[in-house]
Amino acid sequence: MHSESALPTFDQLPKFRDCTGCAWEVWGKDDQLGTVNLLTDELVKEASKEIKTGKAISLNWPINFPAKPPFHRQPPVHEVITFPEFGAVNDDVIHINTQSGTQWDGLKHFGLVHHGLFYQGTPASFFKSGNLNVTNPTDVDPELIKYGIHNWAQHGICGRGVFLDLVKYYTDVHGELPYDPFTAHPIPLADLLECAKKQEVTFRRGDILIIRGGFTLRFNNATEEERNGLGEKADTFAGIEQTEDVKRFLWDNHFAAAASDLPALECWPPPEGVAHLHSTLLGLWGMPIGEFFDLEALSKHCAETGRYTFFFSSWPLNILGGVASPPNAAAYF
């Protein structure tokens, strides 16, 4: 189906075994972009009208944080190399797990874990692990890099950003955040909708949805012991609930991507017997999931201006066959 065509509703999408809302045929069986297909030239051109003042805000947390990442991932390493023999020359080396900080989860990251399948029904065994060893730019095996993050890197994830500042919404209504972002608290769809209503935000096809759930604020105000403990404690984090209505909301609004300042976007872990939202967004739809976005400066600017939509730009690292990437994301007003 062409990206400009009418899209099926969530309820019109077929099931795959026990999974509702399978979009594998929406953009054709050979598709490797998923919902990024929605970001057409015409849509990006229209979204650029959001730029009124030229104000730009980075949405990237320094790669140094978290210094001890959750999910037992490798801490980031930054080494500066000096060359005293040349008088005034330095290099540096950065060694990161692409999932450890601000990131887009790509199509190779998470699939239908209970079926062993990724986007487009690709078996987990299809993907090679270890060094992909791509050395010749004129002779790259397309099967070796299939579904890699380079597809989004070469297309760009650019369009209209829509910001739901749940932290501000909750504190305005309740006086404080009614949950600890370091705990497995499910954020209900009703609160997202009420937040959008309070901000007078409406959604358009191809929007990039960005949610501030309070993780970065909590992290910044945490003790050193709490921050260091993230890499060792049970992985429990607040996030949006994994209900059919949430899936219906995300699909029927036809968001091109969804991101937040939370470690998993969704509540982690899911309730007993409930499938991961990652499986639907990445495995069934091919929708980029953004995590650990730094939304503090964005929140301040949106509150000051009353504007919660903007032009959003993201150019992931062009890693052939990559699983994930820092987003290199910004909001332009």
Image (cartoon, rainbow, N blue to C red):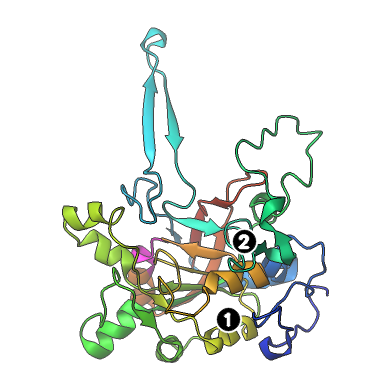
Q: How far apart are marks 2 and 1 (CA)?
A: 17 Å
Residue 63 among those drawn in magenta: no
Position in image of residue 217 (x %, y %): 27, 66
- 323 lies above or below 119: above
Numbered tag placed on residue 77 in the rendering: none
- Furthest residue to the top? 85
Instruction: Give the total of numbered labels.
Output: 2
> Residue visible at 34% across and 78% down?
185
- Is residue 6 in sight in this rendering? yes
In this picture, which residue range is highlighted in magenta? 293-298
Residue 294 among those drawn in magenta: yes
SS for callout 1? helix
> Residue visible at 44% across and 75% down?
270
Decide which of 272, 309 is in the foreground and name it.
272
* Quadrant placement of the N terminus: bottom right
> Residue visible at 18% across and 53% down?
224
Name the residue tied to disc 2: 157
